Image (spheres, rainbow, N blue to C red):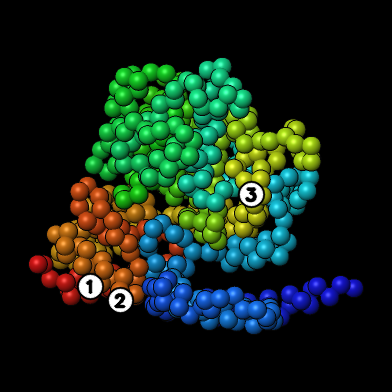
């Protein structure tokens, strides 16, 4: 019998101990790291040692070296950058993904991974109320998911124009114009850059960052021809949703491909009380969201959803003599993402959904939104604090008066470490941006966070 399992046992046991210690510390530890990257780097050996050491010793060394530089992103008091925590079943499933080490590209080669991901995809489409016939690709995150959706749109539009993109490339191709709201996320611009489509045409938005359908119609009429329209489900600062039904109708009337960047906001569609804000979103052609945000699975995991599988697979499939591909049915995983080699990201998604069930997913999403409202109400009651947005989902944007004071309060909050909220700028003002994404956040975390902000405000008088 091979001794290989024993070669892993001690290292895995040590990893489990360190993981348990870390998770036990999260609820009470300072959220911010105690050391920065340069300080951590100084504690790491500058040269690779000549001699090997025991695997368990490596794990112990790594845990000790890393601990001072770890951000407690899983804390119920972490509200930075729309980062979620990790559900227990999803974390444990991710450990199995590493142990199984399946290169999830081909259904033939990794049938279990493919089947579990297909099951997760079907559950997601049902929960989000998107077309059951859509393809789902498991990407690194929403930036890549946006890239996938827009790549499928580019492929579809080129096919419709009679241009062989695969053979001829973009040189001399019909010009595709992209339209997006002025308050789009930069990930959309990055995806367009990857695709060689150039900058989008910015369309006016209202005070909450929602695209104006009349302005979209006017902009599209001024630049007719093949076009992509990017809509937003969840504005970065306000959490607001573009008026999907009206904007999609404008775009489809002009034969555009409609893509929805719903990095965190698309999850509102699962809730009976929130989905009205997204009315009509199912009529789009592609959607992007994250599982490592609102669904609380481990990093990294985004979701690219495309209503026209043939366009998606034409954009990403490849045929060689050594790949045993699936010609019909659900398709191979590599046909739905830019990677031929990847870990089975969809397995933790399956585990998270299986742990929560339909009612649990709905309850978690609604609880995140309720916690955002509670934070907004508590902060608004503090003298000198102004909540700048309509809190419609999980984002809260706050000012403390002048830009200078807002900056100082934000820096103090991050330095003290009891809570983590990130700074930003919106509507020409410095703000504190709060993103409620963690499944563990409870009333106690909300109260402690409000108290931390109250203390920071009191310590930073108006200049």
Gap between marks 3 and 1 measured at Cα: 43 Å
- Label 1 sits on residue: 456
Residue 347 seen from this side:
yes
Q: Position of residue 406 (x, y in %)?
A: 20, 62
**Which comes before the other along the chain, label 3 or label 2?**
3
Quarter in which the N terminus is drawn: bottom right
* Relative to 311, residue 21 above or below: below
Check if mark 2's residue and mark 1's residue have beta carbons within 8 Å: yes
**Which comes before the other along the chain, label 2 or label 1?**
2
Instruction: Choose top left, top right, bottom left or bottom right for residue 152.
Output: top right
- Label 2 sits on residue: 416
Q: Please tell me which residue is depicted at 48% across the width and 80% down the height of the picture.
A: 43
Check if mark 3's residue and mark 2's residue have beta carbons within 8 Å: no
Describe the element under mark 2 as helix, strand or loop: helix
* Relative to 375, residue 390 above or below: above
Describe the element under mark 1 as helix, strand or loop: helix
Q: Please tell me which residue is depicted at 17% across the width and 59% down the height of the picture.
A: 403
Q: Is residue 49 left or right of residue 25?
A: right
Q: Please tell me which residue is depicted at 37% across the width and 54% down the height of the picture.
A: 394
Residue 381 seen from this side:
no
- Label 3 sits on residue: 120
**Mark 1, other Cα within 10 Å: few <14 / some 14–19 / many ≥20:** some
Q: Residue furthest left?
A: 463
């Amino acid at each position: 019998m091979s001794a290989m399992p024993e070669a892993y046992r001690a290292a895995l046991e040590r990893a489990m101990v360190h993981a348990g210690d870390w998770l036990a510390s999260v609820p009470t530890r300072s959220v911010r790291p105690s050391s920065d990257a340069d300080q951590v780097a100084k504690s790491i050996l500058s040269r690779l040692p000549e001699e090997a050491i025991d695997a368990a010793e490596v794990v112990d060394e790594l845990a000790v070296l890393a601990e001072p530089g770890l951000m407690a992103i899983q804390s119920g008091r972490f509200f930075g950058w729309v980062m979620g925590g990790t559900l227990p079943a999803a974390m444990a499933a991710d450990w199995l993904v590493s142990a199984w080490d399946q290169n999830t590209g081909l259904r033939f080669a990794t049938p279990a991974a493919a089947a579990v991901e297909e099951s997760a995809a079907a559950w997601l489409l049902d929960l989000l109320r998107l077309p059951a016939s859509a393809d789902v690709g498991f990407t690194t995150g929403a930036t890549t998911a946006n890239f996938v959706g827009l790549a499928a749109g580019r492929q579809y539009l080129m096919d419709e124009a009679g241009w062989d993109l695969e053979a001829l490339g973009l040189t001399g191709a019909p010009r595709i114009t992209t339209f997006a709201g002025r308050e789009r996320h930069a990930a959309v611009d990055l995806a367009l850059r990857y695709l060689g489509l150039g900058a989008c045409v910015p369309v006016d938005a209202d005070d909450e960052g929602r695209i104006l359908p009349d302005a979209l119609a006017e902009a599209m009429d001024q630049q007719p021809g093949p076009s992509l329209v990017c809509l937003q489900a969840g504005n970065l600062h306000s959490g607001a949703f573009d008026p999907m039904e009206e904007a999609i109708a404008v775009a489809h009337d002009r034969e555009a491909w409609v893509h929805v960047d719903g990095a965190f906001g698309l999850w509102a569609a699962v809730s009976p009380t929130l989905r009205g804000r997204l009315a009509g979103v199912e009529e789009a052609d592609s959607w992007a969201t994250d599982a490592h945000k609102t669904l609380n699975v481990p990093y990294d995991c985004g979701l690219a959803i495309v209503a026209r599988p043939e366009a998606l697979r034409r954009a990403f499939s490849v045929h060689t003599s050594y790949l045993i591909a699936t010609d019909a049915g659900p398709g191979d995983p590599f046909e739905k993402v830019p990677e031929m080699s990847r870990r089975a990201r969809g397995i933790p998604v399956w585990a998270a959904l299986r742990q929560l069930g339909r009612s649990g997913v709905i309850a978690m999403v609604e609880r995140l939104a309720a916690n955002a409202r509670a934070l907004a109400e508590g902060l608004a009651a503090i003298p000198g604090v102004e909540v700048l947005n309509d809190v419609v989902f999980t984002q809260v944007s706050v000012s403390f008066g002048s830009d200078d004071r807002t900056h100082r309060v934000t820096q103090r909050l991050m330095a003290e470490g009891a809570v983590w909220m990130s700074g930003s700028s919106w509507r020409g003002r410095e703000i504190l941006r709060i993103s409620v994404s963690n499944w563990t956040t409870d009333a106690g975390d909300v109260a402690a966070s409000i108290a931390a902000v109250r203390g920071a405000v009191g310590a930073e008088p108006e200049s």
